[in-house]
Image (tube, grey):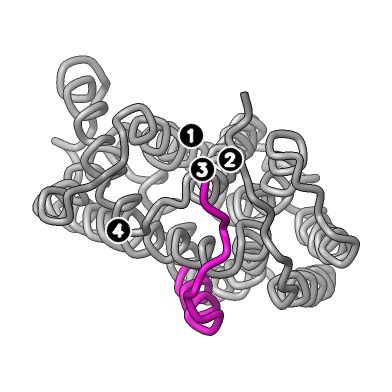
Amino acid sequence: MPQISSDRPRWKGFLAAGTVIVCWTGFNIVSRLGGKSVLTPFDIAALRFAVSAFFMLPVFIAVKNTLPWPRLIALASAGGVFYALLAYGGFAYAPAAHAGIVINGGVPLATAGLAWLWLKDRPAPRSLWALAIAATGVVIIGIRSLGAPHPDNPLEWLGDLCFAGAAILWACYGLMVRLWHVRPIDAVSGIAVASATLYLPIYILFLPKGIFNAPLSDIVLQGVYQGMVAALIAAFSYAYATLSLGSGAASLTLAIVPATSALLAVPLLGEAFGGVTVVGVVLVTVGATFGALIKKPAPNLRAPS
């Protein structure tokens, strides 16, 4: 198994991580809009995979994707089908702010925990401090929104549970990219094609649909953003950042998304931005930046038995 060291310049890794932050911030807003529309989570997932597969099938064939099918299915399941279904299911019950906190803030913690348990890759002391700072910020940001569910929405907890599952699956995706040293183009094209192959027949034949009653504007918005920005640009950039910076540093950059989501929610969703959130935003940003700047030599990882 090759080492995870890479000749990719770290500045390109940071640029890729910044792209992910922008894409995932918009993902929280756009997905919440989809969750409040007549589209079902199954519709949004179908749009994501249909659009991404349409663009990636020629790439999948042209680059001669070298991933064995078992690994391809594992990546598509973790970073594609089940991640998408859990995330979009969560947006049907919980607001965008919850996704920013639970998914984006939870991915670094899930990544560190899984890497420690699964790969025996214990974070360095400085990385643990960065995780602790970022986690404190996430908790502070979430005190108000997670601690005070809306009286008209008693199932918010179910949305938060879905978001937690999505965070764990995305952490698994990042670790598999790192463990198997998957080329970003193989990861993106493979997930797109495999997810569409696995999911679309089941969706067409069995799953409930609201797409026939949805306005064309909603369908176009979800199809373009979910199928191109989230499934292609964000997934490619995250895989690139993982190989350039390491899975820990790459995932820590996602801890900034709760802050950017909170900032963007002020003009777009009319959400308050009080002093508690300001403190949380500062802590998350400091912790994520501190962790991303740590350059840890990668061990020679081998797949666990």
How far apart marks 3 and 1 lie (CA) works out to 19 Å
Mark 4 or mark 3: whose residue is earlier in sequence: 3
Circle 4: element type = helix
Q: Quadrant of residue 114?
A: top right
Residue tagged 1: 86
Q: Would you say 100 lies left or right of 29 here?
A: right
Between 71 and 283, the one lying in front of the other is 71
Amino acid type, callout 3: Met
Q: Quadrant of residue 287?
A: bottom right
Earlier sequence position, callout 3 versus callout 1: 1
Gap between marks 4 and 3 measured at Cα: 14 Å
Q: Position of residue 242 (x, y in %)?
A: 53, 61
Crowding near the residue tagged with mark 3, few <14, some 14–19, many ≥20 C-alpha atoms within 10 Å: many
Gap in angstroms between the C-alphas marked 2 and 1: 6 Å
- The answer to the question of whether label 2 and label 1 lie on touching residues, with beta carbons closer than 8 A, is yes
Dot 4 alpha-carbon crowd within 10 angstroms: few under 14, some 14 to 19, many 20 or more? many
